[in-house]
Image (tube, rainbow, N blue to C red):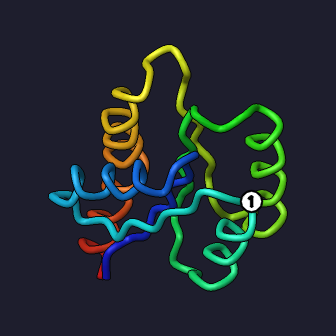
């Protein structure tokens, strides 16, 4: 079973584009672009292993979402993309997080199972 990563961004099509560009990775991608969708995803998908938030969201919204995620799912790491790398930096950022955070654990679980 593939690990699940929740991508949060300002525009739904951006998140979909990131998932398409990274479909070669053994990850199930979920997306959210507003508070209700983030809550719905967190409450309905227990397999979410981490959350990656893009830089396009306003700081107040990012802060609110961090609080919501931390209260609903204290077991999940939250990764915030920097703003300096711009929109084109989102895919490499997501790739790095998954390569360092998710894939090593997944191969360990497969080897142990």
**Element type at marker 1?**
helix
Assess disc 1: are there few (<14), some (14-19) or many (≥20) residues with their C-alpha within 10 Å of its C-alpha.
many
Q: Is residue 75 left or right of residue 99?
A: right
Percent across and percent down for residue 11 are 52, 49
Q: Is residue 105 above or below residue 89?
A: below
Which residue is painted at 54% across and 58% down in the image? 50
Q: What residue occupies the far top of the structure in this picture?
A: 84
Percent across and percent down for residue 25 are 21, 58
Q: Is residue 24 left or right of residue 53?
A: left
- Which of these two is toward me, 99 or 88? 88
Which residue is painted at 46% across and 62% down in the image? 5
Which residue is painted at 58% across and 81% down in the image? 46
Which residue is painted at 57% across and 42% down in the image? 79
Q: Which quadrant holds residue 92? A: top left
Q: How many marks?
A: 1
Name the image quarter holding the N terminus. bottom left
Q: Is residue 98 left or right of residue 110?
A: right
Q: Is residue 70 above or below residue 79?
A: below
Percent across and percent down for residue 65 are 76, 52
Q: Which residue is mark 1?
A: 69
Q: What residue occupies the far left of the structure in this picture?
A: 24
Name the image quarter holding the C terminus. bottom left
Q: Which quadrant holds residue 2? A: bottom left
Q: Is residue 30 left or right of residue 88?
A: right
Q: Which quadrant holds residue 32? A: bottom right
């Amino acid at each position: 079973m593939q690990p699940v990563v929740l991508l949060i961004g300002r525009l739904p099509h951006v998140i979909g584009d990131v998932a398409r560009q990274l479909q070669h990775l053994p990850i199930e991608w979920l997306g959210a672009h507003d508070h209700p969708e983030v809550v719905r995803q967190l409450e309905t998908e227990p397999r979410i292993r981490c959350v990656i938030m893009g830089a396009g969201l306003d700081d107040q919204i990012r802060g609110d979402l961090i609080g919501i995620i931390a209260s609903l799912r204290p077991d999940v790491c939250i990764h915030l993309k920097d703003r300096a790398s711009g929109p084109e930096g989102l895919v490499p950022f997501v790739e790095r997080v998954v390569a360092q955070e998710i894939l090593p654990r997944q191969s360990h679980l497969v080897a142990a199972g």
